[in-house]
Image (cartoon, rainbow, N blue to C red):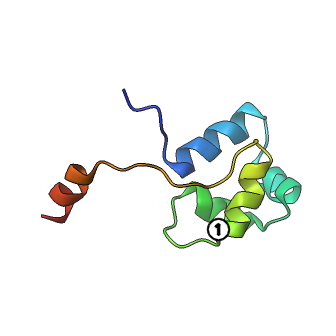
Amino acid sequence: MNLTKRLPEFLKEKRKQAQLTQPELAVKAGVGLRFIRELEQGKASLRMDKVNQVLKLFGHELGPVPINRQKLIDEES
């Protein structure tokens, strides 16, 4: 059972649990609405400091996560 979630799904779930709209979250986190939308859509290149700014509202921060090396090899094949 995989207990980890991808960042976009995690953030969207937390935002909805807090009953916040994307614009409300952007204001509370001090980032732009476009940034929140890109974060929830899974944009590959985002500033880590801004991501942490948003995650901090929910008591989290970015960190290293173990990966399945075999899955990476399979995906690259």
Is residue 74 visible in this depiction of the protein? yes
Residue plotted at (78% across, 35% down): 19
Q: Is the C terminus in the top left, top right, bottom left or bottom right quadrant?
A: bottom left
Q: Quadrant of residue 50?
A: bottom right
Residue plotted at (80% across, 58% down): 26
Is residue 22 visible in this depiction of the protein? no
Mark 1 residue element = helix
Left or right: residue 5 versus residue 18 is left
Q: Quadrant of residue 40?
A: bottom right
Left or right: residue 61 versus residue 32 is left
Q: Quadrant of residue 75?
A: bottom left
Q: Is residue 54 above or below residue 35?
A: above
Going by the picture, which residue comes out furthest to the top?
Answer: 1
Depth check, front residue: 7 or 62: 62
Q: Is residue 47 above or below residue 22?
A: below
Residue plotted at (84% across, 51% down): 24
Left or right: residue 67 versus residue 35 is left
Q: Is residue 57 above or below residue 36?
A: above
Residue 22 location, x and y as percent? Answer: 74, 52
Residue plotted at (64% across, 68% down): 48
Left or right: residue 52 versus residue 71 is right
Amino acid type shown at disc 1 = Met
Residue at which label 1 appears: 48
Residue 76 location, x and y as percent? Answer: 18, 65
Residue 1 location, x and y as percent? Answer: 36, 26
